[in-house]
Amino acid sequence: MIGPSATQRRLLAPAAPHRARHHPTPLGRRSSASQRVWLFDLDNTLHDCSKAIFDAIDHNMTQAVIEALDVDMGEAHRLRVRYWRLYGATVIGMVRHHGVDAAAFLERSHRFDPAPLVHSETGLAEKLRALKGRKILLTNAPMQYARQVLKTLGILQQFESLWSIDHMILQGRIKPKPSSALMKQVLARVGQPASNVVLVEDTLKNLKAARKLGMKTVHVFHPGTPFSGLHAGRSAYVDVRVNSIGRLLTGRHALRD
């Protein structure tokens, strides 16, 4: 049996989430008093991926499948979608079924400059700053891409730490959202009870997993999120439903303690 490559070993090794610079609170240190922790998703939550970035990722990921497996575009597209539906991330299927190098596959899939393609609501940095509490990024995207997007949005320094798919390794396997094991690990490291933690997401299955553990939930409704059209109203496991981050600052949408 062929063992994992050096790149795979680096990705699958236990890793702590990256701490953004200029923030004094390390992840995992308990605060002396209760403090709200905001866990923010990235794509279609903090910015609008559907205008351009999703197309770029889909194209690059299809090409990555073609290059890794030597298949035609139709088969590559079929596998990309199938593994995403089965596992929540195409890279998991590529690793499990084809033994590809996970880090290399993620790099190839996101080998483009997102800066010209980023779209977000006006005044996002100021609105995000107005939300009181600690802010942590929790995304199924890779770290390099996440950092580039946050820098483009001008909000990187507002996050005390960035938790990307690079860190979602449990017992040697990639476990992205909505894994309950991942969510439990996140709760253990933020050092606050679940009732003080808020997951802000566009993907309902991730919010449902968070609610089962006692977290508060904010659904950022985006019509470009897969299957969003199936949910016209607010689900029972959603505390607040908004269509932008700024709406969290308004009276009836503000999250109650």
Image: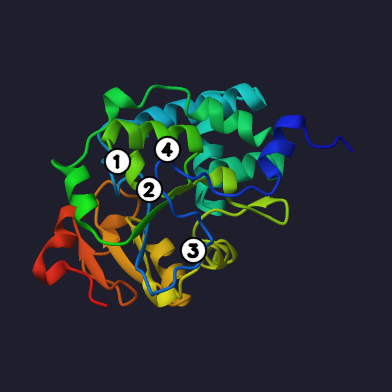
| Secondary-structure class at tag 3 | helix
Image position of 173 (left or right of 58): right
Q: Is residue 244 visible?
A: no
Question: Which disc number belongs to residue 155?
Answer: 1
The residue identified by callout 3 is 190
Q: Do the residues under discs 3 and 4 have CB atoms within 8 angstroms?
A: no
The residue identified by callout 2 is 159
Depth check: give the residue in front, 167 or 114.
167
Mark 1 vs mark 4, CA separation in Å: 11 Å
For mark 1, does the 10 Å Cα neighbourhood hold few (<14), some (14 to 19), or many (20 or more) residues?
some
- Residue at the location (22% across, 35% down)? 119
Q: Do the residues under discs 2 and 1 have CB atoms within 8 angstroms?
A: yes
Mark 1 vs mark 3, CA separation in Å: 20 Å
Residue type of the residue flagged with mark 2: Phe
Q: Quadrant of residue 155?
A: top left
| Secondary-structure class at tag 1 | loop
Residue type of the residue flagged with mark 1: Ile
Depth check: give the residue in front, 25 or 6.
25
Q: Of callouts 1 and 4, which one flags the residue occurring earlier in the amino acid sequence?
A: 4
Residue type of the residue flagged with mark 3: Val
Q: Of callouts 2 and 3, which one flags the residue occurring earlier in the amino acid sequence?
A: 2
Question: Which disc number belongs to residue 146?
Answer: 4
Which image quadrant: the C terminus? bottom left
Image position of 43 (left or right of 252): right
Q: Of callouts 1 and 3, which one flags the residue occurring earlier in the amino acid sequence?
A: 1
Q: Nearer the viewer, mark 3 or mark 4?
A: 3
- Residue at the location (66% across, 39% down)? 11
Task: Name above or below for residue 115 compared with residue 99.
Answer: above
Q: Nearer the viewer, mark 2 or mark 4?
A: 2
